Amino acid sequence: MEKIQQLKERFDAFIKGVEFVKRPQGLYEPVAYTVLQKGKRLRPMLCLLACDLFGGEYHEAEYPALALETAHNSTLIHDDIMDQSPIRRGMETVYKKWDTNQAILSGDAALGMAFDFAMRTHRPVETLSLLTHAMLEIDEGQQMDMEFETRKEVSIPEYLEMIRLKTAVLMATSLQIGAVVAGADDDDQRHLYDFGIGIGMAFQLQDDILDCYSDVSVFGKVTGVDIVENKKTLMYLKALELASPEQKERLMALFSGEVSLHPQRKIDEVIALYDDLGVKAEVERLMADYYRQAYAALEAVKLPEERKIHLRRYAEMLSGRNK
């Protein structure tokens, strides 16, 4: 735990010394607002821990880690516009604090800055290539997510592919970039990437659960946003699978917009249905399966187990983030 805390503190100190706000100030202030907010630094931490795992130089991973954090925040700025989310990490989202046009432009600027940061390492071509590929896959996942909102039926395999693209890929890429910077071979890069996919899938499934069962003061997001926005998360899809014909009809009506209810009443009714069907436990079981797959991939990395302890502990911390 001490090593993890040291890496986070060192990274936080590093980004404080990076110039984010340039001219025109209005373009860059929202980028600084999002990137410099206190947070878990999940993707940078994965990158730094992967670099450390293979004995790489910390300073060579700093800018790639910052590239990952900045790229991730660029997607959040745009996601919050599309989802009409007023709060993230317990603070106003960019489009609420400024306006939608500013959020679109500053989100684009954040991505440009991320690409620039990715080039500031001794492995610039590989780092930038991995990051750009991941960002395209995130866009593919976001497009699928938007299309699911208006589709009557979405299969569970389709949903799992969407979250692999939208969430797991960047976590996996964060680990791979750290491994690349440290000079890991192709096989170990692939195993670490697979480890990231497993924990990324589990992480997003936990996000689906937390949207229904969380405290905004702890989680930093308003509860029930997915339900209000008719997002067909695994919670919803599992509920359809387990529901009686009557429950299924009601659930589909609630998510189709056919039923007009106050948002909080809709959230309460949907969560009550989830409780009746035991949906949370079902999703938690699948989440545990993904963590098991992740640890199996980590086991395959050709290094002594004592070298993997910090990465393993970090993944365990992620799995307990709702406690």
Image: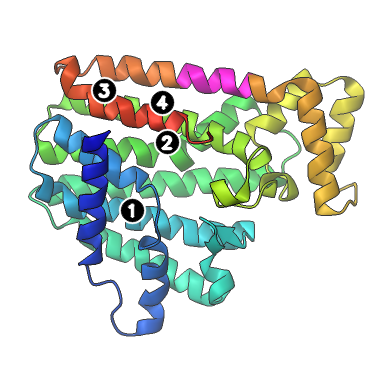
Residue shown at 28% from the left, 20% from the top = 298
User: What x and y, as percent, mark residue 256?
Assistant: 81, 44
Q: Is residue 160 magenta?
A: no
Estimate the spatial distance between the alpha carbons at disc 1 and disc 2, rounded to whole Å.
14 Å
Q: Earlier in the sequence, mark 3 or mark 1?
A: 1
Q: In which quarter of the view is residue 172 placed?
A: top left
- Under mark 2, the amino acid is Ala
Residue shown at 59% from the left, 71% from the top = 96
Residue shown at 68% from the left, 39% from the top = 212
Q: Are marks 3 and 4 in contact (CB under 8 Å)?
A: no
- Under mark 4, the amino acid is Gly
Residue located beneath label 2 in the image: 168
Q: Are marks 4 and 2 in contact (CB under 8 Å)?
A: yes
Residue located beneath label 3 in the image: 191
Q: Which label is found at residue 69?
A: 1
Nearest the viewer among 321 and 226 is 321
**Secondary-structure class at tag 4:** helix
Estimate the spatial distance between the alpha carbons at disc 3 and disc 2, rounded to whole Å.
14 Å
For disc 4, the neighbor class at 10 Å (few under 14, some 14 to 19, many from 20) is: many
| Residue 197 in view of the camera | no
